[in-house]
Image (cartoon, rainbow, N blue to C red):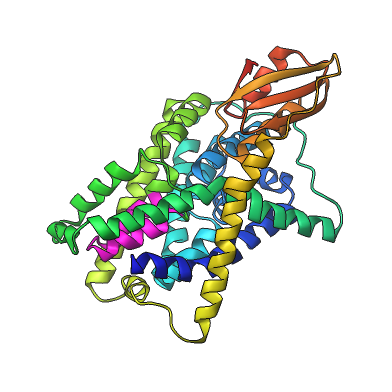
Amino acid sequence: MQEVVSLVGKMSPYLLLGFLLAGLMHAFIPARLYSRFLSRRSFRSVVNAALLGIPLPLCSCGVIPTAMSLRREGASKGAVTSFLIATPQTGVDSIIATYALLGLPFAILRPVAALVTSLFGGCLANLTDKSEETACSKDCTPEELPRGFRARLLEALRYAYLTMMQDIGKWLVVGLVVAGLITVLIPDQAFTLFRGNTLASMLLVLVIAMPMYVCATGSIPIAVALMLKGLTPGAALVLLMAGPACNFASMLVVRKVMGTGSLVTYLVSIVAGSVAFGCLIDWLQAEGLVDFLGGTSQMAMSCHGSSQWLSWACTAILLLLLLNALAVEPLRHKNKPLTNQTDMNTKTFRIEGMSCNHCRMTAERALLSVEGVEAATVDLPSALARVTGTATREALSRAIASVGFTLREA
């Protein structure tokens, strides 16, 4: 388990920095900016969607409602597909963590691979899209950002170290636990049996990675542990790309909201792109042109020198933040009752399909966009929504369905 302890120590400073950058992006960049450049059915909109999605720290569950909102606000199907492919594979936090654990070559090639596969998928979606126009968004209410630098900075910190911690923290912990189990249970050099048959190892990783849920950051320690057991760097990249981008939940939602054709385009782009770039990495490694194993070699060694205190301090801070987000806040929220329903115009509904705070915020914005809604709040743990106003249930249901969720009577 020494490798895992060293992994956490080396990862924690970069994770804290990545979370902070993600929070700053959320608090200082208006949501409308992301849909403004994505409406045309063109190559440029596909490129814009990929470039906007790559740095966003959204997992495959959080990216679904965000992408559906972009679609409702007028983004083309190609742009939405590009966004769906690029965003969960990377993020500013996972790029920094990839550099920390796997080295600079991996940190550069990972977002490049996400960019190329998303461009391919987006262009393919535009070519096969037979609709006349994209979705309209004239009734959509933009996300309100706090005013003033201090207020936005506080929002950035809250989003980074509470909201994001709640969304991906448990998957980060799962990734570390799985990495520890791999280190202990799988024999050293277990994957050398695939030596000379790189494609077989990639197909095995695809079969394992695609159904399961793992976020872009949580997949890194798993990839490191497998590489230390002999998995090729190319097959590890397949895990890093397919694991975060595909799972059964996201596949079902994509099919439900965008159709079977879009789902096929989505899956073909990810599988073909990950295998192609995996083969490229293994070829570059075999030819000695780029060393993709250098990062894992350094990871196997413990931290030394004057930076050791920083690693331990950041690890302690990260653990405290995870404890607060995953244990303290849910317990406090559980004991806090919802506001009493005193207004006759206030109704309670259940929203099915939410799995993170991005889902909750998207559902709230969808409800607030409906004509006649005066106020709306959504509680993630109970999946209950309180809506005040004169809007009909049918209108609320349509708004929630447009972002990939289902409205039910409470």
Q: Picture quarter containing residue 317?
A: bottom right
Q: Picture quarter containing residue 21?
A: bottom right
How many circles with numbers are drawn on the protein? Answer: 0
Relative horizontal placement of residue 185, taking residue 404 as reference (left or right):
left
In the rendered view, tell whether residue 86 sits above or below residue 128.
Answer: below
Query: How far from the left and from the top, in percent, is residue 409?
Result: 65, 14
- Does residue 23 appear in this view? yes
In the rendered view, tell whether residue 11 sits above or below residue 132.
Answer: below
For image coordinates 49% across by 64% down, the residue present is: 97
Instruction: Depth check: give the residue in front, 3 or 139.
Output: 3
For image coordinates 64% across by 29% down, the residue present is: 135
Relative horizontal placement of residue 11, taking residue 188 as reference (left or right):
right
Instruction: Depth check: give the residue in front, 352 or 288.
Output: 352
For image coordinates 79% across by 28% down, the residue present is: 339
Main SS, magenta region, reads: helix
Query: How far from the left and from the top, in percent, is residue 191?
Result: 19, 58
What is the quadrant of the N terminus in the image? bottom left
Instruction: Depth check: give the residue in front, 316 or 30.
Output: 316
Which stretch is magenta?
A: 218-241
Query: How far from the left and from the top, in percent, is residue 99?
Result: 46, 69
Instruction: Depth check: give the residue in front, 43 or 334.
Output: 334
In the rendered view, tell whether residue 81 sits above or below residue 107.
Answer: above
Query: How far from the left and from the top, in percent, is residue 217?
Result: 47, 56
Relative horizontal placement of residue 151, taking residue 362 as reference (left or right):
right
For image coordinates 57% across by 43% down, the residue present is: 42
- Does residue 43 appear in this view? no
Q: Is residue 220 magenta?
A: yes
Q: Is residue 231 magenta?
A: yes
